[in-house]
Image (cartoon, rainbow, N blue to C red):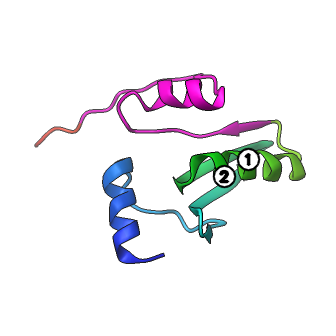
Amino acid sequence: MDKETIERYLKKSGDDYIDITNLIENEHGFMSWRIDEEDFVCLNVYGDGDYWDTYINELAKQLGCKKILGGTTRKAGMKAFERKYGFKSVSYTHLRAHET
């Protein structure tokens, strides 16, 4: 993963870092994940969304996970995920930074 890709991802996602837990990188981009109890948790995902959607679903099934969890900090990001991938929103928090 080159520096430009990392910077582009951080700017676009609003994340502060890329978690290297189970990091997978290939020509479709990258993703990192973990298992939390019986749930598959997507930590960082970047690149070809259709590819990663299929990959995540297959991997979660192989690992015996009951749910796939993920999040977004992008405006209207959840609505786009719901529409494109059939995801269901179970929680929403809007955080706003302020100066001290």
Q: Position of residue 82 (x, y in %)?
A: 58, 25
**Most common secondary structure along the magenta stretch:** loop
- Under mark 2, the amino acid is Tyr
Q: Is residue 8 above or below residue 39?
A: below
Element under disc 2: helix
Q: Nearer the viewer, residue 60 or 58?
A: 58
Q: Nearer the viewer, residue 17 or 98?
A: 17
Image marks 2 and 1: residues in contact by CB distance under 8 Å: yes
Q: Nearer the viewer, residue 3 or 38?
A: 3
Any mark on residue 51, and which? 2
Give how far apart the Cα atoms at labels 2 and 1 are: 5 Å
Q: Is residue 46 on the magenta stretch?
A: no
Residue 6, picture quadrant: bottom left
Crowding at mark 1 (Cα within 10 Å: few <14, some 14-19, many 20+): few
Q: Is residue 89 on the magenta stretch?
A: yes
Q: Position of residue 65 (x, y in %)?
A: 83, 43
Q: Which residue is mark 1?
A: 54
Residue 53, picture quadrant: top right
Quadrant placement of the C terminus: top left
Which contiguous range is marked in magenta? 67-96
